[in-house]
């Protein structure tokens, strides 16, 4: 008798907690915005990658229209030097200040996203430039994913 009562109480508790009314945010499925205007200031390569990842064509009519303005700052700092005072590592810091205007609601949001990368110094300039460009591409993709998640989070709150 106690076992059946306990099992019924446990099952009832699990069902009531399972259906509490909260919705799981699925960032991959919720691409519910359309970028009307994209303005960028700063590093052109990074901004182009961010724009390419955020602006995409949609056929769905239930999208929220946005204006996006991004200011990107790239800093290349010396991270390490060896005993003979030669540079061995650089630190690349990309900071993006993002302003979003939701056209339908006429609300503006601002946030800043920063990402860092480490670059080993090389004697060959071609290898150094190639490594720097590949790290900057990775950082730009990370920043665009973070911007996408932030936009989705903002639009889910509306």
Image: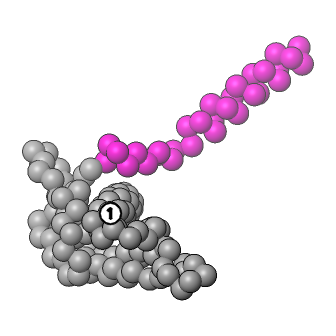
**Does 12 appear above or below 38?**
above
Q: Where does residue 87 sit, x and y in percent of width and height?
A: 48, 79
In the displayed structure image, the side of residue 146 where residue 15 appears, left or right: right
Q: In the displayed structure, would residue 85 be above or below residue 15?
A: below
Instruction: State whether residue 65 is above or below residue 4.
Output: below
Q: Quadrant of residue 90?
A: bottom left
Whether residue 157 is in magenta: the answer is no
Residue at figure coordinates x 64%, y 39% from the top left: 17
Residue 65: horizontal and vertical position, in percent?
Answer: 16, 63
Inspect the magenta stretch and tell me whether residue 2 lies in it: yes
Along the line of sight, which residue is nearer the eye, 86 or 56?
A: 86
Tag 1 residue: 127
Quarter residue 150 falls in: bottom left
Please state which of residues 153 and 62 is positioned toward the viewer in this rendering. 153
- In the rendered image, the quadrant that contains the C terminus is bottom left
Colour scheme in use? one colour
Range shown magenta? 1-30
């Amino acid at each position: 008798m106690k076992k059946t009562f306990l099992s019924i109480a446990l099952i009832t508790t699990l069902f009531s907690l399972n259906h509490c009314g909260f919705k799981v945010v699925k960032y991959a499925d919720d691409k519910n915005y359309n970028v009307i205007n994209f303005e960028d200031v700063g590093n052109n390569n990074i901004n182009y990658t961010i724009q390419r990842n955020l602006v995409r064509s949609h056929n769905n009519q239930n999208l929220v229209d946005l204006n996006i303005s991004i200011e990107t700052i790239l800093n290349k700092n010396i991270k390490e030097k060896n005993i003979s005072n030669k540079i061995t590592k650089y630190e690349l810091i990309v900071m993006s200040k993002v302003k979003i205007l939701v056209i339908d609601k006429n609300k503006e949001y601002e946030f800043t996203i920063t990402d860092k990368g480490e670059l080993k110094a090389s004697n060959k300039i071609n290898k150094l430039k190639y490594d720097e460009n590949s790290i900057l591409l990775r950082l730009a993709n990370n920043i665009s994913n973070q911007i996408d998640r932030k936009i989705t989070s903002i639009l889910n709150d509306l």
